[in-house]
Image: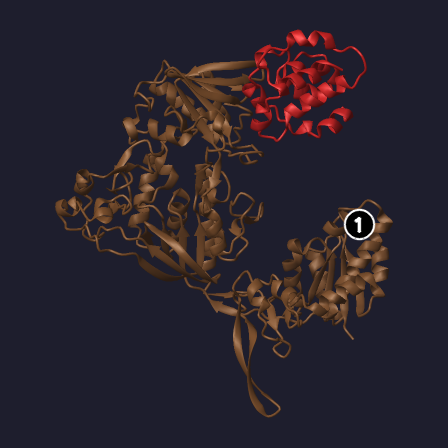
Chain colours: A red, B brown
Amino acid sequence: MQELAEISGEKINDCYQCGKCTAACPVNPFMDILPHQVLRLLQLGQVEQVLQSKTIWVCATCFTCAGRCPRDVDLSVVMEALRAILLRQRGGSRLKGEDMPCLIRKGMPEQGIVSGFRKYTK
Amino acid sequence: MRRIGVFICWCGTNIAATVDIETVIKEAREMPGVVYAGDNKYMCSETGQTQIKGTIVQQKLDRVVIASCSPRMHELTFRKTAAAAGLNPYLVEIANVREHCSWVHKDKDAATVKAVALIRTAVAKAALDTGLEPQEFVVTRRALVIGGGIAGIQAALDIAEAGYAVDLVERTPSIGGRMAQLDKTFPTLDCSACILTPKMVDAAAHPNINLLTYSEVEEVEGYVGNFEVTIRQKARSVDAAKCTGCGLCFEKCPSKVKSEFDEGLALRKAIYVPFPQAVPNIPVIDRDHCRWFSKKKCGVCKKVCPASAVDFEQSDVLIKQKYGAIVVATGFDLIGFEIFGEFGYGKHPDIITSMEFERLVNASGPGGGKLLKPSNQQPPKNVVFVHCVGSRDKSRGKPYCSKICCMYTAKHAVLLKEKHPEAQAYVFYIDVRTAGKDFEEFHRRAVEEYAAVYLRGLVGKVFPSGDKLLVNGVDTLSNQAVEIEADLVVLAAALTPRHDAEGLARMLGIGSDAHNFFVEAHPKLRPVESHTAGLFLAGTCQGPRDIPETVAQAGAAAAKAIALLNKETLLSDPCVSAVDESLCTGCLACLKVCPYKAISDKPLTEKVHGRQRRRLVAEVNKALCQGCGACSAACRPGAMNLLGFSNEQLLAEVDAICL
């Protein structure tokens, strides 16, 4: 929890569970736990459950949740911090370097490719 | 040598549990000038006060120090006690050993040392106290009420009933305010207009009430008991004395403008009365939109008026009047939606505010209260209500709860079902707050009898899709994202003070909070008084509240104003600034910092070395001065002294602590 607070700099307890993040999230149908549930579980200290979820990898970091949050909690930063916690552990990359070329399609923005690498490797 | 008495209060266990009273008494007896130190379990009690009075006489005390609670609590009590024993009440000092010591410390030894230090400080100040005499001044027995909504109307009626003249100033052409715009009121579903219009008529007919509609306060000077106010009565362009209110003028007027009263959902004419029950029922010409005033053409209203009441030449009138008391009741605005793009307000006619919903459902509103979709005049089927739009939103909106939205949304869900039984209400909420008499029961009725579906969560986006509106929301209780095809979306917008409240606060010299709501003198014990004497607050200009609360507060503000006007004369607080003219250099830095306009310049003629010399010095108007001390801090030569808190006294206090 402390690591999460340090990396993200967000105050998890400021969230009052209005669900605006979930309501605004464009990729919520693909998530196993919804954005507001991520914050609720974190408020209850259940970090492990969140770290094992698909949600943190589905998050597209589009910042809609952050922009609409009435409590100034930047969930996109929290998601990034959760990913960082996993990425900083050694071993077990989700993708191998040699797999990458076939995944890169023509017209993909470079920024997308770089953040794709970041997200799927350790 | 002074003869100072020190009285130490136990305050039950509040002080005595943390401060060793015996040690304090022993130490106090050693302080310079102290001839008596004693204690009592409750110094404010009858026995405690008798002890003080008796000791003042027996010991011939000339100064008194009470070590007890905050001076805000009992300074007045003990001043009266001293006065009863023949001592000038301003020779009493309070050492606050409760709030500043026992309540905030746990270590008894350290708290005792601190209590002794606080008493030593008060003793040092008391030694330099001088007796002060309040001044008497005459009260103008007339009240001004600013704002003609339900708060202002109620306050004006109550003051007028007590027998005092009241001027009720309203900016728009009619009194009535927000309540006149509403359809029904929660939780009883009383017709808002039916209960309001009799009061409007009463106010207009009352011999003690002078209605000044289409008027604004322009300047406020003076002080409690004697405010001098300039009011601009804007030109109506209709002679009120001749007009019969027949309505022929606005029937024939060709210029159409969006009606403010109907929240822009309907059109009014350039010459208009805002609504059918308007008081006074006299039209006004909106000169910005009138063809005569913009192009010097038309003039049809003047031609058709059977009473020859239309007068294009009329000009604004400035009224100057003196008042003893002022009640401020300026009401609320709704938060602007520009920053809440996700709701699409303004992009689609079927996305409306709750206030617009009130007009659509109101019999005198656009569409005669049939509640049809503004886009195509068809009855809506699915209606989505969204709570907390801008409320409880510290990042883009207002951090506070707007208080009335939970209840009026439940009311809207009920009214919807009454108008269109086949319609379905969906209410997105964070919490439902129903703290009020019969409020919870009403909300449950909306759910149980009127089958409103309450979804716990907010709405992320509203966007048009075909002839429907797609609403993306969430229900956090079932942890599901929700999508609703809506016909009408109603946004419960946050209440804010009037957009120009800040300017009015400055003009009146009353405090306002971070959101520009006017601030009461004490949140619990002085809820209808402002920080400035003689200025009282009523209604939503002070914070979000509902009609019953507003009416109660308006009555309370009126009672306070009446109590003030009942007095022929008032006593001023003598703790005001005084100028030492021999030290004053006439730089007038004090004049610039004075928030109460209490300081002016005065030419002084004096003889220096046998020659006449004129120079400027500062002069304090004792009635205007509120004793804030800003001038005293700004004064470079040290000529300004706040009586009762002189520079010498403050330095003596610092010395008593530090040396």
Closer to us: B440 or B546: B546
Q: Mark 1: few, some, or many residues within 10 Å (few <14, many ≥20)?
A: some
Residue B211 x/y as whole percent: 32, 51
> Is there any visible trace of residue B444 in the rendered image?
no
Q: Quadrant of residue B22?
A: bottom right
Q: Chain of mark 1?
A: B
Q: Nearer the viewer, residue B451 or B428?
A: B428
Q: Secondary structure at mark 1?
A: loop
Q: Is residue B424 left or right of residue A102?
A: left
Q: Position of residue B610 (x, y in %)?
A: 59, 93
| Residue B47 coordinates in the image, percent (x, y) | 71, 57
The kind of residue tagged 1 is Ala
Which residue is label 1 attached to? B16
Q: Is residue B445 above or below residue B134?
A: above
Q: Give the vertical position of B163 relative to B445 (above or below).
A: below
Q: Nearer the viewer, residue B418 or B343?
A: B343
The quarter in which the N terminus of chain B is drawn is: bottom right
* Residue B335 seen in the current view: yes
- Write the residue at 51% across / 25% down: B440
Q: Quadrant of the C terminus of chain B?
A: bottom right
Q: Seen in the image, is B355 located left or right of residue B131?
A: left
